[in-house]
Amino acid sequence: MVLNRTTRQIICTAYGNGSQHDFSLYKQSRLALCCSTSAQVDSGYQGLQKLHAQTQMPYKNTKLHPLTKEQKRANTTLSSSRVLIEHVIRKLKIFKIVSEKYRNRKKRFGLRMNLIAGWYNYQLVL
C-alpha cells in the first residue's frame, strides 16, 4: 500500500494470492518509486534499499552487534512516523475481506479492495 503522507490518502494497493513476503509482493507489483520520493518501510522490505536510495528502514539488533543510542533513536523516530500507516491499515481491516481469508471469487478481490480504499479516501474528505 502506498500512502500520501500529508493527506493520508491511499494512492495504490497491491495484493497477492495466499501468504506472501512483503518484498516479493513489491517486486511483483512493478511499482516504480520516484528517486525523490521517500519510502518508510518496515523490516519486511529488506533489499529495497538496493533498488531505491531514499528508503528508510529500521536498524536490526544482533547478539554480537547491539544497537547504538543513535540507531535506537532513529528507530524510534521512524516508528513514530510509520504509526500513521499502521492506523490506515487498521482502518482497512475493519472490512473482513482484508483481515480474514477471502472466500469469494478471486477475480473480484482487486475491485473490492480498491472500493474499500476509495471509501477510506472519501471518509478523509468528509
Image (cartoon, helix red, strand yellow):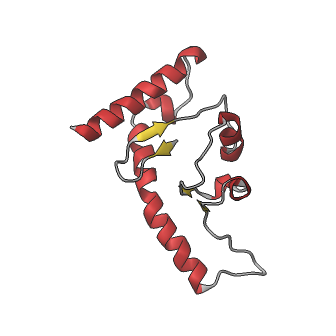
The C terminus is located in which quarter? top left
| In this rendering, position of residue 58 left or right of residue 115 | right
Which residue is nearer to you in this view: 108 or 4? 4
x, y (%) of residue 84?
A: 41, 55
Residue at (70% x, 35% y) in the render: 28
- Total numbered badges shown on the rendered structure: 0
Is residue 93 visible in the rendered image? The answer is no
Which quadrant of the structure image shows residue 120?
top left
* Along the viewing direction, whichever of 56 and 42 lies nearer the viewer: 56
- Residue at (69% x, 43% y) in the render: 21
Q: Is residue 53 left or right of residue 78?
A: right
x, y percentage for residue 27?
70, 40
> Can residue 89 be seen at all in this image of the molecule?
yes
- The answer to whether 62 is drawn above or below residue 103 in the figure is below
Q: In the rendered view, would you say 86 is above or below 17?
A: below
Q: Position of residue 46 (x, y in %)?
A: 70, 56
Residue most extreme to the bottom: 69
View extreme (left): residue = 126
Q: Residue at x 42, y 47 (%)?
A: 4
Choose between 4 and 62: the one closer to the eye. 4
Q: Position of residue 117 (x, y in %)?
A: 41, 33
Q: Which residue lies at the image location 60% right of the left edge and 60% below the top edge? A: 54
